[in-house]
Amino acid sequence: MKNIVILISGRGSNMQAIVDAQIAGANICAVIANRPDAAGLAWAAERGMATAVLDHKLYAGRAAFDTALAALIDGYAPDLIVLAGFMRILTADFVNHYAGRLINIHPSLLPAYTGLNTHARALADGVKVAGCTVHFVTAELDHGPIILQAALAVLDDDSVESLSSRMLVQEHLIYPQAVRWFVEDKLSIAAGKVRVASHSAAAVLISPPVL
């Protein structure tokens, strides 16, 4: 059994997808938010999960908040920390404390389009393929070892809203899968690359197909 702590800032749709996947061997022991009004807290509480709020606005700076957050997380003895729409840039000390146990999902095919406004930037560049990435978190923003990616074709009439909506469907597929692989001890990192036991590839191409 692996203890999992999920961090959210809003409604936590990826958190919901992970919970709904009912991953064997996964014990989601807490959902923590940095915003008191995060809608995902109520969703988790309704399902009997422990929840907590650590309001980042009450701390003098990023380091102080991250120190308090790590102390709160460590109280649950986690094997894995999942960032599910957690809108905070984490300090290097925090990330290094959870090295190999901290994962995130980003709405682009990393290393392309790190940071914010990924869909708008991709559409502005006229890309034909977009995607999302689950990765281990490192001190360099959105550059950690890649676990799993999903890709889909960008449609001629796509807007930021439509592309985001279609991409979210893929996020809800690959994030639970990445968590499942972690729980099953199938993930290893060598030379900055993730290897998945019993899988020859860690990339998934989602329809519509790219011709």
Image (cartoon, rainbow, N blue to C red):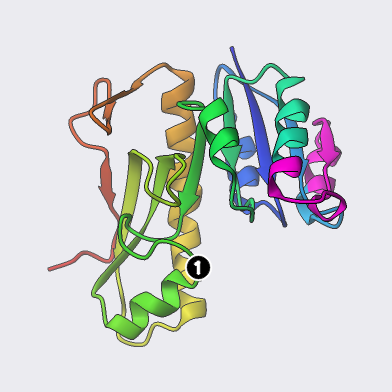
Q: Under tag 1, what secondary structure? A: loop
Q: Looking at the picture, does residue 176 appear above or below residue 4?
A: below
Residue 22 counted in the magenta span: no
Q: Quadrant of residue 51?
A: top right
Label 1: few (<14), some or many (≥20) within 10 Å?
A: few
Left or right of 7, for residue 141: left
Residue 151: percent from the left, percent from the top? 30, 58
Name the residue rendered at 47%, 77% in the picture.
162
Task: List the residue tagged with mark 1.
Answer: 116
Do we see residue 185 in this rendering?
yes
Which contiguous range is marked in magenta?
Answer: 41-65
In this view of the protein, which residue sits in the foreground, 110 or 172? Answer: 110
Residue 132: percent from the left, percent from the top? 39, 56
Q: Locate the N terminus and report the quarter of the image it occupies.
A: top right
Name the residue rendered at 82%, 30% in the picture.
50
Q: Looking at the picture, does residue 150 appear above or below residue 159?
A: above
In this view of the protein, which residue sits in the foreground, 2 or 59? Answer: 59
Left or right of 172, for residue 197: left
Q: Locate the C terminus and report the quarter of the image it occupies.
A: bottom left
Residue 47 counted in the magenta span: yes
Do we see residue 21 in this rendering?
no
Q: Looking at the picture, does residue 100 appear above or below residue 90?
A: above
Name the residue rendered at 25%, 76% in the picture.
127
